[in-house]
Image (spheres, helix red, strand yellow):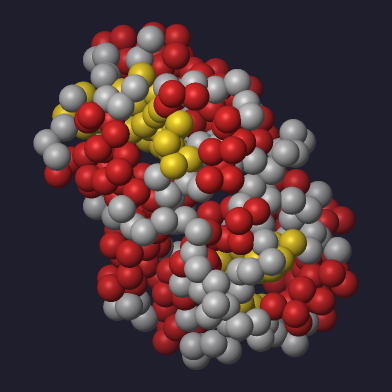
């Protein structure tokens, strides 16, 4: 079977790599296409090298408006698919790369499989939410991570025969990478000890493109008694400088560092006291290594872990500080990760090979 994988961002590399590995081990003919949506060394090449993913084609489409990015990706993917028509195309998540891959497949009548289908924030102001809904409506295979995701799909205009609950490939990825991450020296290099720091990540446009929200989060850090390690996203750093917020780089309790490789980041988070983030994927990851998460968003497409592993606080300074205080000592031992058993990639390839619909 000729299987194409299309991705463009760091989370997609991490979540698709166990599926790529599974498909390769089964002897399928693979083609790996990188749209170029994430293009810096830290956000792209470093991760791909660590995961031993060999990209066949890099479209090099980055740093453009959403409209231009999707239109260019769609055009390039259409050209590639016409030259070498795949049997099936896989993409994961909710980025512009995923929308482009789904549309290109649909236009040419190629089967498209959406990994992590059906997750919803129900906030159409989020570009990612619009992307999710569009992709799910034109997917042939919809691999839902949870029953909650399946319910969303069943209540939408989707191919009901193609819906399968399989878990989330992030569990596969972390289980494969667990031992390798233990070799990381990141804690030693940063001069920190297990459990005495928090990790912060923040990259979503609704937070970092808004000066008031961005500054509110930074003020919460300033007033907190916790030590934060902040692998800062290029977009966030750029906007702090643009908005004249450079003084926050001097905060005594915040270590601003460059984005980390996957194994270093996994080691850093799994040994932390708590995680403060606006990321969806990191919410999932934290439930696997059982760390509390304070989510700096008003909503989330990961409702399965709200009230157990995570707490929504938005970007209000007082709510963030209260959330940090409430979650920092929470006992998570009684809660189970809802995202599967680490066999998601195997289940997906079994379904594809057996042609269950």
* Front residue of this view, candidates 11 and 169: 169
- Residue 247, can we see it? no
Residue 65: x and y in percent read 64, 29
> Residue at image x 60%, y 21%?
157
Residue 96: x and y in percent read 55, 31
Compared to residue 39, the image places residue 6 above or below, namely: above
Tally of marks = 0
Compared to residue 69, the image places residue 260 above or below, namely: below
Q: If the image is split into quadrants, where does the N terminus sit?
A: top left
273 to the left or right of 267: right
> Residue at image x 39%, y 9%?
108
Compared to residue 136, the image places residue 245 above or below, namely: below
> Residue at image x 33%, y 64%?
175
Q: If the image is split into quadrants, where does the C terminus sit?
A: top left
Q: Quadrant of residue 25?
A: top left
Residue 21: x and y in percent read 23, 47
Compared to residue 315, the image places residue 198 above or below, namely: below
* Front residue of this view, candidates 32 and 231: 32
28 to the left or right of 272: left
Residue 153: x and y in percent read 57, 32
* Front residue of this view, candidates 234 and 155: 155
300 to the left or right of 175: right
215 to the left or right of 254: right
* Front residue of this view, candidates 141 and 258: 141
């Amino acid at each position: 079977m000729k299987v194409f994988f299309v991705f463009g961002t760091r989370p997609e590399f991490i979540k698709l790599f166990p599926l790529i590995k599974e498909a390769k081990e089964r002897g399928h003919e693979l083609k790996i296409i990188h749209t170029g949506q994430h293009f810096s060394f830290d956000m792209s090449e470093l991760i791909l090298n660590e995961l031993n993913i060999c990209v066949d084609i890099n479209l090099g489409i980055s740093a453009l408006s959403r409209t231009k990015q999707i239109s260019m990706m769609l055009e390039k993917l259409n050209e590639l698919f016409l030259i070498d028509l795949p049997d099936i195309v896989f993409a994961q998540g909710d980025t512009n790369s995923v929308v482009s891959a789904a549309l290109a497949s649909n236009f040419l009548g190629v089967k498209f499989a959406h990994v992590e289908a059906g997750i919803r924030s129900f906030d159409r102001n989020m570009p990612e939410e619009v992307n999710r809904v569009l992709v799910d409506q034109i997917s042939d295979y919809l691999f839902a991570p949870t029953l909650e995701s399946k319910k969303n799909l069943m209540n939408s205009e989707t191919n009901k025969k193609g819906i399968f609950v399989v878990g989330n490939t992030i569990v596969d990825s972390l289980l494969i990478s667990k031992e390798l991450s233990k070799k990381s020296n990141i804690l030693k290099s940063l001069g920190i000890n297990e459990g005495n720091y928090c990790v912060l990540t923040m990259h979503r446009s609704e937070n970092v493109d808004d000066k008031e929200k961005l500054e509110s989060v930074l003020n919460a850090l300033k007033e907190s008694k916790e030590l934060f390690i902040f692998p800062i996203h290029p977009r966030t750093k750029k906007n702090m400088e643009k908005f004249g917020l450079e003084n926050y780089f001097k905060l005594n309790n915040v270590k601003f560092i460059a984005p980390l490789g996957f194994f270093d980041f996994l080691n850093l988070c799994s040994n932390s006291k708590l995680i403060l983030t606006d990321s969806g994927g990191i919410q999932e990851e934290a439930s696997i290594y059982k760390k509390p998460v304070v989510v700096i968003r008003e909503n989330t497409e990961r409702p399965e872990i709200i009230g157990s592993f995570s707490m929504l606080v938005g970007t209000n300074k007082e709510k963030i500080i209260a959330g940090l205080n409430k979650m920092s000592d929470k006992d998570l031992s009684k809660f189970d990760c809802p995202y599967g058993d680490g066999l998601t990639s195997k289940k997906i390839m079994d379904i594809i090979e057996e042609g269950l619909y």
